[in-house]
Image: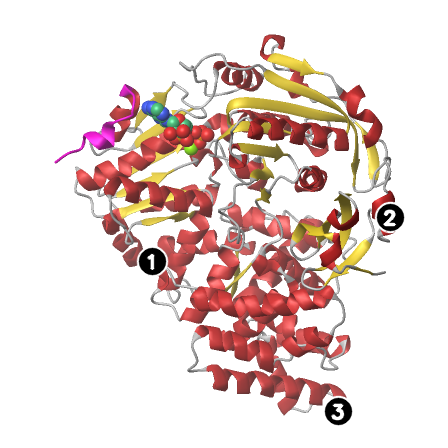
Amino acid sequence: MDVTRLLEDLNDKQREAVAAPAQDMLILAGAGSGKTRVLVHRIAWLMEVELVAPYSILAVTFTNKAAREMRGRVERLMGQPLNSMWIGTFHGLAHRLLRSHHEEAGLPENFQILDSDDQFRLIKRLLKSMNLDEKHWPAKQIQWYINGNKDEGLRSRHIETHGDHTQQKMKEIYTAYEQTCQRAGLIDFAELLLRAHELWANNPQVLQHYQKRFRAVLVDEFQDTNNIQYAWLKLLSCENNNMMIVGDDDQSIYGWRGANVQNISHFLRDYPTANTIKLEQNYRSTSNILDAANAVIGHNPGRLGKKLWTEDSEGEKIALYAGFNDLDEARFIVSQIKTYYEQGAALSDCAILYRNNAQSRVLEEALLHEGLAYRIYGGLRFFERQEIKDALGYLRLISQPIDDAAFERVVNTPTRGMGDKTLSNLRVFARENDISMWQASSKMLAQNMLSGRAATALKGFVEMILQMTQEVKDLPLEKKADHVIKHSGLYAMYQAEKGEKAKARVENLEELVTACKQYEAPEEAQEMSPLSAFLAHASLEAGDAQADANQDSVQMMTIHSAKGLEFSFVTLAGVEEGMFPSQMSNDEPGKIEEERRLCYVGMTRAMQKLLITYAETRRLYGQDKYHTPSRFIREIPGDFIEEIRLRTQIKQPMQNRFSGATSHAAFEDSGFKLGERVEHKKFGEGTVLNYEGSGEHARVHVNFDSVGTKILMLAYAKLTKIG
Ligand SMILES: Nc1ncnc2c1ncn2[C@@H]1O[C@H](COP(=O)(O)OP(=O)(O)OP(=O)(O)O)[C@@H](O)[C@H]1O
Ligand SMILES: [Mg+2]
């Protein structure tokens, strides 16, 4: 047996972890020390040396992207596909479990997942039906309250209100929410985890099956698990299996979503014989970058404490740039990326990281101006678009008529003359009788409880759904989608609408049919009907699918989503007080520390070059804001930093937004102004951002609502003004 390849390119400590005998282990180590690499090699080692079947391995990580990468790396090491190995996110794995054991979990077979937006809408409607004023009971806050409790494993019945009126009311809303979801066969993201925990906690025979099955349980990014996730893992462990927990307390950045870094200490308490292995050599960054990041994180109190060193050279100093404003900042960042690119780097070696998604727009414009391709992770996603959600709503209703969220979404889309009053009557009736809106419709119709017009409209809808259900029963998935889109009136509705946006919507609906056609259910979804599998896929993996994933492009994302990744050249943009650390972090204890860890995560993504920028003024949400440089910049010792000051040279043309500070004659001849709304035959409506060239070579940059920014030849683009 040749296992050397599994131990190659590992240092002594890493090898110790990879080749350890069966035992519980904690790998606690700083950024870039090879934790994820160790985890991947350990999986391969277990299969090859300990002869653990792929079927008996469970590996958990934080994002779908990371899970896919991990599977790919293990499969490459082993030289074969390993379908029966369970690798996924907590949510993905919980979903898989609940599908297999829906009965024990108290769920209907075709239960559907509510994404955060669906959840928010459902709460809003619920508040309305309970006659609660949103001014006093904001839906966002209720959503946080419900999810926060679920993350702690608390159902409404567990909550003590101690006679407090507000608490009592919140609890009531939570109870009503639970009932609504249960009635409609819906589960939100937090519920996935809670249910999966309850499934095991309340069904010993199911738990035992998985305890026996999984001999090895491995968890990456453990510092960001929340209490319910840890409790779930703990249920699984027994004499038959071992845990390998991998994490870095300094990279815990999801406290705001209930993650509990204390879980690392809890693990040591709960597994007293666990072997702790610390990795101290960083293989990712130059020593300037690493030392600077260490200096920043050194300002946090109460750390578990880790050393981190590198053999790498000092490298370049960290570049610091003070932008005159956000436009200047963006232009500087892009000029640096361009230079790096011209020196031979790939665009995908460059990442721009920011604290808020809202920062991306100005950066995008600057990239477009230079004609550099980019890709944003976590932008508006295909499955989250209005028309797609409409179509999915019909499919969900066919799959499971009691799905109230789907019912509400489509009952009056396209309009069928159903008034608010009728809907609100339906809601109340459903709630009072503890039935779904679908069932309420039949009952109210049967008992003639609705007035003439409303009754006709509702009857038409119910009959249509019943008929569609019959008609698509034996059709393949893509035909089902096509049928539903056409027969529901959605297609006709968007076709009849004027404007490019509507056209893009029609195209998206067609794209949905294509997506159904191309969809291959993963191995774990084989037991489900293709329709259920597809609907779950649309809710769980909405974020990751993007068409041009392979094009070389600058990588843009929030620092949160950069977790675990690395790039040669990283820019941290908008490093100002009030932005990063964020304004809100001043109010709550422990928040500044979490922001500092986020800064550490951001800095340690960089391998070769790190650029930190801030803007003296920034326009956000339509207002100019003045900011001072972030405290995190001051926490980097001066030796590691080189300040760049050349903004006087570029200040001038940047002064006016969309102003046309230089001569725009050729452009204005064309009749368009910067910032103007236009329409394009294929791409729909958008805003003119920039232009270049003149005469027949003139090109225009338009940010389209549906497809994002495109550069078009003005002569061929056939743009029309709107508005
Ligand atoms: N022994 C080694 N020799 C050479 N390169 C290594 C070694 N160990 C890890 N690396 C490389 O160092 C980089 C960082 O490794 P990895 O991503 O596994 O670190 P990590 O500890 O998981 O980081 P993070 O905390 O950011 O998730 C990767 O490019 C990896 O391939
Ligand atoms: Mg990692």
Query: In the figure, residue 492 lies in which quadrant?
Result: bottom right
Whether 425 is drawn above or below 14: the answer is below
Whether ligand 2 has any atom under 8 Å from the Cβ at mark 1 is answered as no
Label for residue 452?
A: 3
Report if residue 85 lies within the magenta region. Answer: no
Specify which label sits upstream in the sequence, 2 or 1: 1
Foreground tag (3 vs 2): 2
Measured in 3D between alpha carbons, the distance from the residue under mark 1 to the one under mark 3, in whole angstroms, is 50 Å
Relative placement, left or right, of 427 versus 267 is right
Identify the residue under disc 1: 203
Specify which label sits upstream in the sequence, 3 or 2: 3
Q: Regarding mark 3 in the picture, which secondary structure is present there? A: helix
- Residue at 43%, 42% in the rendered image: 66
- Residue kind at label 1, given as amino acid type: Asn
Pinpoint residue 452: horizontal percent, then vertical percent: 75, 91
Measured in 3D between alpha carbons, the distance from the residue under mark 2 to the one under mark 1, in whole angstroms, is 71 Å
Q: Which residues are magenta?
A: 1-12
Identify the residue under disc 2: 668
Measured in 3D between alpha carbons, the distance from the residue under mark 3 to the one under mark 2, in whole angstroms, is 57 Å
| Quarter of the figure that contains the N terminus | top left
Foreground tag (1 vs 3): 3
Pinpoint residue 72: horizontal percent, then vertical percent: 35, 44
